[in-house]
Amino acid sequence: MSKVLIIGAGGVGNVVAHKCAAVPDVFSEIMLASRTKAKCDRIAAAIGADRIRSAQVDADNVSETVALIESFRPALVINVALPYQDLSIMDACLQTGVHYLDTANYEPRDQAKFEYSWQWAYRERFREAGITALLGCGFDPGVTGVFTAYAQKHHFDEIHYLDIVDCNAGDHGKAFATNFNPEINIREITQKGRYWEKGKWIEVDPLSVHQPVEYPRIGARESYLLYHEELESLVENIPHLKRARFWMTFGQEYITHLRVLQNVGMTSIEPIEYQGQDIIPLQFLKALLPEPSALAEDYHGETSIGCQIRGLQNGQPKTYYIYNNCDHAEAFREVGAQAVAYTTGVPAMIGAMLLLTGEWQGSGVFNVEEFNPDPFMEHLNRYGLPWHEVVNGPLAFTD
Ligand SMILES: NC(=O)c1ccc[n+]([C@@H]2O[C@H](COP(=O)([O-])OP(=O)(O)OC[C@H]3O[C@@H](n4cnc5c(N)ncnc54)[C@H](OP(=O)(O)O)[C@@H]3O)[C@@H](O)[C@H]2O)c1
């Protein structure tokens, strides 16, 4: 029985709050706090206000977050605000001796760049404080790391090739919208692609490498090589890897819109002066685009995210594909969210549960693949993200 503080009341925060509220044995008291309290109140009302309290917090401000933690005294803070807040919330957890969990790694506002170095630099301080920080516990990063750790534990002596494949075959009926925070999403996609091969990182132009990939229950979809944050920790934590890549599907309509927006400068994070005021074009674009949570009601179709792996077991070559498909409309019926928020929020709740029940424990800063994958895998089946595996079947990547 533990208290948990959830920070961030967007699409993902809504799912985390619903899923934690449904497990009172573990999450006995819940507080949902965010910059805009009205959003917390709406979520709390949908869940039932007796299960969840709400509060206003500016999580960029360490002392405000510390004051909130001290007044509520949670055992764990789940950070589902934005990557910009990661370090300030980690600082607040250190000051108050409270565990920390997030779903996206830190990136500075003025540089479209994400990497673990900033958060890994907290390892010693978390170790000395005797508390845990669990990083990247959504779906990707998150479940993709757990899937890889599970494959390593049960199916391979050596994993050589890892391809993470992420398809959203859902249709929300809008010409252009993003499935999670538009600013973070567009910063991620417009970066150079990057993958790891033979001990070094290789960069390619944004969205320049692509091929069709066959997704279960969906069919073939053009998939684009992107840099994604779990690659950075997986190449550290999975021995024998020769190559690790990440692929994501985009429709032609989406890519055309993105290209036009880029060409006219709307995705830039450099401030420009407009009518005597400095504005950041990407932040202005975010204000125009639909909120990801607003897409949920009319969304239909499925997501399919998994890991395609090749390597050796008992000296024999082996292929392994492990994946989850998630239906947008089912997620909406259950918690009023679309599948991208659902597939992020459920793993965050599971990671929180494993930390609070002591099944995952350790002092320091960890990525999910460093812990025993088995209880997490069981909980995925139990809490709404069932997974499937194909052993020695054909994979999309043979080279
Ligand atoms: N690992 C994965 O698989 C995965 C997948 C998708 C998303 N994510 C991550 O999940 C997180 C949430 O995504 P989302 O789609 O839910 O985003 P979102 O809908 O934009 O919600 C973000 C929430 O954080 C709040 N917030 C922003 N700045 C804050 C601050 N300084 N203090 C307190 N609250 C603040 C926002 O408040 P306002 O409402 O006032 O703006 C909003 O409620 C992001 O970090 C995203 O990168 C991870």
Image: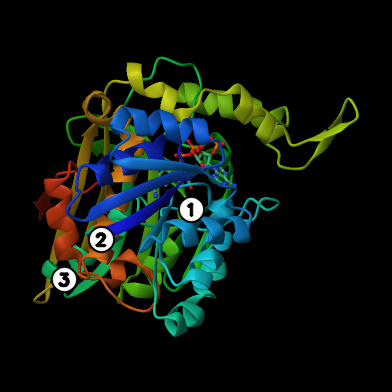
Q: Residue at x 63, y 50 (%)?
A: 112
Q: Quadrant of the N terminus?
A: bottom left
Q: Please say whether residue 374 is visible from this viewpoint.
A: yes
Residue indicated by mark 1: 227
Count of labels in the image: 3
| Residue 11, placed above or below residue 108 | above
On whether ligand 1 comes within 8 Å of the CB at mark 1, the answer is: no
Q: Quadrant of the C terminus?
A: bottom left
Residue indicated by mark 3: 153
- Picture coordinates of residue 366 (x, y %)? 38, 71
Q: Residue at x 34, y 69 (%)?
A: 242
Q: Amino acid at mark 2?
A: Val
Q: Amino acid at mark 1?
A: Tyr
Badge 1: few (under 14), some or many (20 or more) residues near its Cα, within 10 Å? many
**Which is more toward the observer, 211 or 32?**
32
Horizontal side of residue 180 vs 165, given as left or right: right
Horizontal side of residue 194 vs 323, given as left or right: right
Tell me which label, 1 or 3, sits earlier in the chain. Answer: 3
Numbered label attached to residue 146: 2
| Residue 358, placed above or below residue 265 | below
Where disc 3 sits, the SS reads: helix
Disc 1 + disc 3, Cβ < 8 Å: no
- Picture coordinates of residue 6 (x, y %)? 41, 49
Where disc 2 sits, the SS reads: helix
Badge 3: few (under 14), some or many (20 or more) residues near its Cα, within 10 Å? some
Q: Residue at x 28, y 20 (%)?
A: 300
Tell me which label, 3 or 2, sits earlier in the chain. Answer: 2
Tell me which label, 2 or 1, sits earlier in the chain. Answer: 2
- Picture coordinates of residue 130 (x, y %)? 39, 80
Mark 1–mark 3 Cα distance, whole angstroms, equals: 25 Å
Badge 2: few (under 14), some or many (20 or more) residues near its Cα, within 10 Å? many
Q: Residue at x 35, y 29 (%)?
A: 45
